[in-house]
Image: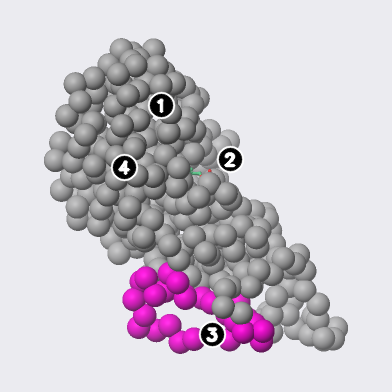
Amino acid sequence: MSSTGTKKDSSGWRRQTLAVRGGQARSNFGETSEPLYLTSGYVYDAAEQAEARFKGENDGFIYSRFSNPTVGMFEERIAAIEGMERAMATATGMAAVNASLLAQLKAGDHVVSAQALFGSCRYIIEDILPRFGIEKTLVEGHDLDQWRDAMRPNTVCGFLETPSNPMLDIVDLKAIANILHDGGARLVVDNAFATPALQRPGEFGADVVVYSATKHIDGQGRCLGGVVLGSEEFVEEILKPFLRHTGPALSPFNAWVMLKGLETLELRVARHCASAATIADFLEGHDQVTRVIYPFLASHPGVALAKQQMTAGGGIVTFDIEGGKDGAFRFLNGLKIVDISNNLGDSKSLITHPATTTHQRISEEDRLAIGIKPTTVRLSVGLEDVDDLIDDIRDALGAV
Ligand SMILES: *Cc1c(COP(=O)(O)O)cnc(C)c1O
C-alpha cells in the first residue's frame, strides 16, 4: 500500500529526480528528509473504521507486516525508478527471490532456470522447489535452444541473473522473455548485479524483477533488504497475499536506509563502474592474471549484448590468478585495502573466493560447469581512489 501524507505530482520527472524525490510523502511537520515511522501497528478512530479497513473499503494502515509508510515510500520510489507498476519490499534479497517464485508456483508446475546463479538462488530452485512437487530444468543461460527445449505445457516461469554471480554471464533478456511468453510463462530476473541504474529488465520484457537491496541499493554495507517488482495485477493478486501471510516484511528502519540509498545510487554506481572498468583493464595486462571477466571488456563473449542491455559494465570484476587455490589465497591474504568478504556492492572494496565461500555448497563439477575454478576470485570494486586499489592489487599479486 502507498504511504499517506502530502505528495508532489511526479508524472514526467526523469529517473534521477524520481530517485531523490519519488514516493516522498511529507507529514504535516514539513520535514525535508523522509520520515521514519518505527511502528508495528496503527490505531483507528472508531471500531467502524477498523472494520472498514479490514474489509478493504478504507485504505489506511493496519499492521507493518502488511505495509508501513516508510516502507511504502521506498517501494514507490524504486517502482518509479524501475518503471514498473508496483514494488513490495522484503527483509532480504533471498526473501524477495523466494517470494517471487513461491507466490506463483504450486505442486505440478515447472520452472526453467539459468544454472549460473547465486548459491542461495540455486538452492531454492534445485532443492526447495522440488520438495513441494515443483519441477525444474537448469539451462545454460546464453543458449536459447536450451531454453526453448526446456519449455513444457506446465512451465509457469523462468528465472535468471544477468550479469550472473560470480561469473558475470550475460543473458539475452528479450529473447528469453519471448520464449517464456510464447509458452504462457513469466520471466523473473534477479537484477542485483546491474541495479536499476544500469539495466531495467522490464524494458526487455521481464515480468518480475527482484533485488537484493543489501547490495548497491544500500551500498554502504549497513542493512539487509530486498524488493520484488511487477505489474499491478501480479503484485495485488499473487505477491501481496503471499507476503502478508508469510511475513518477510522489511523493517521501517532498513527501508529508510534503502530510501536514502536510492538518492545516491546512480552517482555511486557510476563511480563503481568507472573504477571497475579501469581495474579490469589493468588486470588484463597483468601476466599473473590468467583470465579477466568484465561485461564491457572486448574479450567478454557477451559484450555486444551487455552493451544493449546495460549502460555500463557494473562494479564487479571476476578473475583468475596463477598458482591454483594457494595462489588465490595468497593474493587475498596479501591485500591491505581490499577486504576479504562475501558481500558486494559496498563503498568498501571487497573480494571473495567463490569456490570456498558463496558457491562451496554446489559440487565441484557443477562449479566448473559454470566456470568457477579454484583460481577464481570476485572483486566488488568500492568507492576508494582507484589508484590506491590498483596499487593494492599490484602489491598483492607480487606476493603470490
Ligand atoms: C546477494 C544476492 C542475493 C541475496 O540477497 P540477500 O540480501 O543477501 O538475501 C540474491 N541474488 C544475488 C544475485 C545476490 O548477489
> Three-letter amino acid code at disc 1?
Leu
State which quarter of the image contains the N terminus.
bottom right
The answer to which of 14 and 285 lies nearer the viewer is 285
Query: Ligand 1 closer than 8 Å to the CB at disc 3?
Result: no
Range of magenta residues: 1-30
**Is disc 2 placed on a helix, strand or loop?**
loop
Q: Earlier in the sequence, mark 4 or mark 3?
A: 3
Q: Which residue is mark 1?
A: 335
> Three-letter amino acid code at disc 3?
Lys
Displayed quadrant of residue 46: bottom right
Crowding at dot 2, Cα within 10 Å, few <14 / some 14-19 / many 20+, comes out as some
Mark 1 vs 2: CB contact within 8 A: no
Q: Residue 278 lies in magenta, yes or no? A: no
Q: Earlier in the sequence, mark 1 or mark 3?
A: 3
**Is disc 1 placed on a helix, strand or loop?**
loop
Picture disc at residue 386: 4
Picture disc at residue 132: 2
Task: Answer above or below: position of 316 versus 392.
Answer: below
The answer to which of 135 and 1 lies nearer the viewer is 1
Residue sitting at x 85%, y 83%: 47
